[in-house]
Amino acid sequence: MKYCTVCLQPDTRPNIQFLENGICPACNYFDKLKEVDWQERFEILEDILGSYKRGPGKYFDCIIGVSGGKDSTRQALWVRDKLGINPLLVCLSYPPEQITQRGTNNISALIENGFDVVISSPAPGVWKKLVKEAFLSFTNWAKATELALFSSVPQLAIRYNIPLILWGENPGLQLGDMKTLGRTGYDGNNLRYMNTLSGGGLDWMLETGIDPKHMIPYQYPTPEEFKHHNLQIVYLGWFLGDWSVANNGLYSAVNGLEIRIDSVENTGDLAGVSCLDEDWVTLNQMIKYYKFGFGKTTDFVNEEIRFGKISRDQGIELIQKYDGCCSDEYIASFCEYIEITVEDFWKQVHASVNSELFDVTKDGKILPKFRVGEGL
């Protein structure tokens, strides 16, 4: 395990490739932003939008997937109020047991801001069965639901005949998931290859005995379907030099976004503006930490280091204190939902801990073998 020499990105992130000088792709990309002609990028965006401008009988210029969170709220408001285009917003809603009141309020706020929103809700019984199977088989309850979240946007773009999809950040440039890189910095049609979506397909879901007709929400359109319907995903974050967790949160909060009031010790979320529509993602961030040695705190700290808001040493202190944090209350509510005990939850997590990075003590404590910022 090695760390980026600029930020605190570890080389254990899936699909990442450090440069020869030990710098991660995200820091390399951020450094090159100093040379960007932002006016030129804005003109490129205007040209793209112009080429997809709605014709006679069409009402929407583009489609944006939203959760009501910081990134989607900023995108929706910016493209409408700054660029003067009319987006159709698409939201895949969690089942009642999972969605938070905060999440409901934030979607309502987008609607009240004057947007048309289509809400898709996969069958809750199938969703619950897949959540449980994904956790017990992969220690990743979101393995199926992430497919549904990402798939809903291009599926509905096809359904409503809206070929232009605006997305947020480019995972290849801004996180380091290199398999998602497209032909240009804003081409998002390789999003299908990101770590969240790749691997496993539908086979493991079908093995649960669920009728294939209930799998439609979990099927990302194929490259052939993208080509047939002329779909194009454009990373909007490539055109915004101030795209970040903190900036998007601030932009959205002043426009009605309801943020978390939970403690950092319960979530590892230093800004309180991420994953607002549900709480169980905190479990996955904790488990991600035990699998790869980094979690929610690391992702936020890295952005803050690149923007010069904190030092690398300050980042190390924050990561050591908060990465992998998760409220016992969130764990208990998740276990109640999938009908397992908390003890069985921890047995599953302990069995999935990366033994190269962590030790599991006899009393169940998980202790890192590595030092943040140094590695193994």
Image (spheres, rainbow, N blue to C red):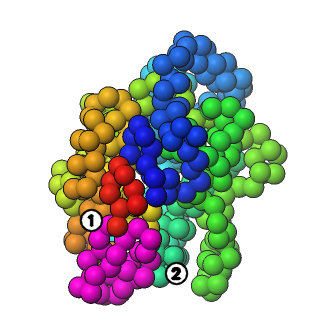
Q: Secondary structure at mark 1?
A: loop
Task: Tell me, yes or no, whether the highlighted magenta stretch contains residue 224.
Answer: no
User: Percent x, y for residue 333?
Assistant: 28, 75
User: Percent x, y for residue 298?
Assistant: 35, 50
The answer to whether any part of residue 207 appears in the image is yes
Whichever of callouts 2 and 1 sits on the residue coming sooner in the sequence is 2
| Mark 2 and mark 1 residues within 8 Å of each other at the beta carbon | no
- Asked if residue 272 lies left or right of residue 188, the reply is left
Q: Amino acid at mark 1?
A: Cys
Residue depicted at x 36% and y 85% = 347
Magenta range: 340-368
User: Percent x, y for residue 291?
Assistant: 44, 67
Please tell me which residue lies in front, 14 or 115: 14
- The residue tagged 2 is 137
Residue depicted at x 51% and y 76% = 138
Task: Tell me, yes or no, whether the highlighted magenta stretch contains residue 351.
Answer: yes
Please state, as top left, top right, bottom left or bottom right, where the C terminus lies in the image: bottom left
The answer to whether any part of residue 153 appears in the image is no
Q: CA distance from mark 2 to mark 1?
A: 21 Å
- The residue tagged 1 is 326
- Asked if residue 280 lies left or right of residue 196, the reply is left
- Asked if residue 344 lies left or right of residue 118, the reply is left
Q: Amino acid at mark 2?
A: Ser
